[in-house]
Image: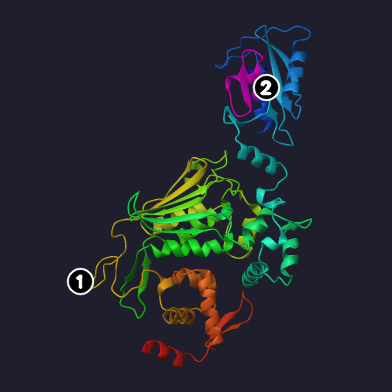
Amino acid sequence: MINLIHTISAGESSTLEFKTNFCNEAIETIVAFANAKGGKVLIGVSNDGAIVGTTLNEETVQNWINEIKQKTTPTLIPDVDTVEIEEKNVVVLTIQEYPLKPVSYRGRYFKRTANANHLLGVSEVVNIHLQTFNSSWDYHTNNHFKLEDISFEKIQLAIDSINENGVNISESPLNFLLKKDLIRGEKLTNAAFLLFTANDTVMTTIEMGRFQTDIIIKDTARSQTDIISQVDQVLNFVKKHMNKAIIFTGDAQNTQQWQYPMEAIREIVMNMIVHRDYREAADSIIKIYDDKIEFFNPGRLPDDITEEDLMINNYKSTPRNKIIADIFRSMGLIEKYGSGIQRIINYFKEAKLPKPTFKNQSNGFVVTVFAKINNLDTQNVPRNVPRNVPRNVPRNAQEMPQEKRLHLIIQLIKKDTQISMLELSKKIGVTHKTIKRDIGKLKIQGVLKRIGPTKGGYWKITEINNYINKIEDE
C-alpha cells in the first residue's frame, strides 16, 4: 500500500491513469496501455491524485472484467487488485503490453502517449501491426504486381553498383530478388516494385517546381520512375536551379561553391525517397525559391519522436521501409542509418547558412533550407563580373562539357589514386551515375585503368600527356 501511495503522489504518466469510477474511458485507457508499454488504471482516484474510493459489491469487479472482454478486440483481461487506502477502496487494473497489436475498443484504436490516450489513424494502425511482426510495409507482397512489371536490366544495374561498393554478388537478377526477400512465393514485394518498376507509376510521383513567387512558376518537372533512378532525376533538377560560383584562389584549379551544401541536399533527397510513406495518396513535392527550398514528403514523424528530438539528435531511427533502406545502403547510396538530420544541420553550419527547419505538416513532413543573399563567396571575383553569375561558368556541373569534366576527374585522381567514385561525385558536384559514365569513357579511351578490387585498389592513369594537351587546346 505504501508503494501505491507513492505511485499516486507522482501523478498520471505514460503507464498510470486515475479514474474516479469505472467507465468507457477507463477501457480506452486499458487498450491504449496494451498498444504501448502496458500500465495501471486506478479506479477510485481523482485526476489530482485525491483518494475518493469506489463502491464495490460481490459482482462489481467481475462485471467490469466482463465488460472489458466484450468491448476489446482481441479480448483483454487485466489483472485486478483491490486496495484499501484511508478506509476507501481503490481498484487497480493492470494490463501488460499486448504481443499482437493493435488492440481496439469498439473498433477504435488508442495508444498511450505521455499521460494521454492518442486515437490512431489508419496508417498508424497499420504501422503498429507491421512493427509487431518486426517488418515494414515494403516487405509485404502485393497481388497487383507481376514479375513482368519490373525491369531485370535495372536489377542488374543495382547488382553492379553493390559490387562496386565492395560486395561480391554473382547471382542472377532473379536469385538476387529471392535472396533479398524482394520476391516470395512468386509474388513481388512492394519494395521490389518501387525499386525496379519497368514503367512510370503514380506511386512514386515527385513534383518539382522552380517558383518565382508562390503563384508564378518558372519551371516544372515530374518524376514517376523507379526510386533508384529518382535520386539522379531529383538532384539534377535541384542543381539546375541552384546558383554556383567559381572562387578565384590563385591556384591552378579554382574552387566551385554551390548556393547550398550539396552533401546536405543529397541527404535530404535520399531521406525523402527512402523514408516516404508510399501508402499515402499525396505526392512528394519540391519547391525551389530564390532564397529557400521546401521538401515535402508523405509520412509524419513516428509518435515517439518530436521535432525537438530531431534537432538535438535525441531519437532512435527506424527506417519506415526496411528493405528499401537496406538496398540503398548496399549500393552505397546511404552511408549511415539514423544520423542524417544531424549531418544536414552540420553541413549548413559549416557553410554558414541558416539552420534548416523540420516539421510535421498535414499528413507529411517538411524540410526547409535557406540561402543567404549573396551567400556565395565572391570576394576574389574580378570587377564587372555580376555576383553569383560568374562569367563563362555553367549553371551546374551537369551542363559542363564532358571533356572538361573528364579533365577534372583526372586531376583529382592524380592527387589521390585511391579516391572513390562517391568522393569524385561530391567534389565535382555531379551524380554518382554521371561519374560512372565518365569513368567508363576514360577506360574505353585507354586513359584510365582500375588496379585491384573496389576497396583497396587504386586508379592508374596512362597516355595522359597527349590527352591533357588535347583538352587544353580546346
Pointer 1 local density, CA inside 10 Å: few below 14, some 14–19, many at least 20: few
Q: Are marks 2 and 1 in contact (CB under 8 Å)?
A: no
- Give above or below for 15 relative to 138: above
Q: Residue furthest left?
A: 384
Residue at numbered disc 2? 27
Circle 2: element type: helix
* The N terminus, quarter of image: top right
In the picture, residue 76 is in which quadrant?
A: top right
Residue 267 placement (x, y as % from top left): 50, 58
Q: Residue at x 31, y 74 (%)?
A: 249
Q: Which is nearer the eye, 168 or 458?
A: 168
Residue at numbered disc 1? 384
Mark 2 belongs to which amino acid?
Answer: Ile
Q: Residue at x 53, y 44 (%)?
A: 314
Residue stretch in magenta: 8-28
Q: Which is nearer the eye, 65 or 354?
A: 65
Q: Is residue 355 left or right of residue 231?
A: left
Disc 2 and disc 1: Cα gap in Å? 75 Å
First in sequence: mark 2 vs mark 1:
2
Residue 2 placement (x, y as % from top left): 66, 17
Mark 1 belongs to which amino acid?
Answer: Asn
Q: Which is nearer the eye, 241 or 203?
A: 203
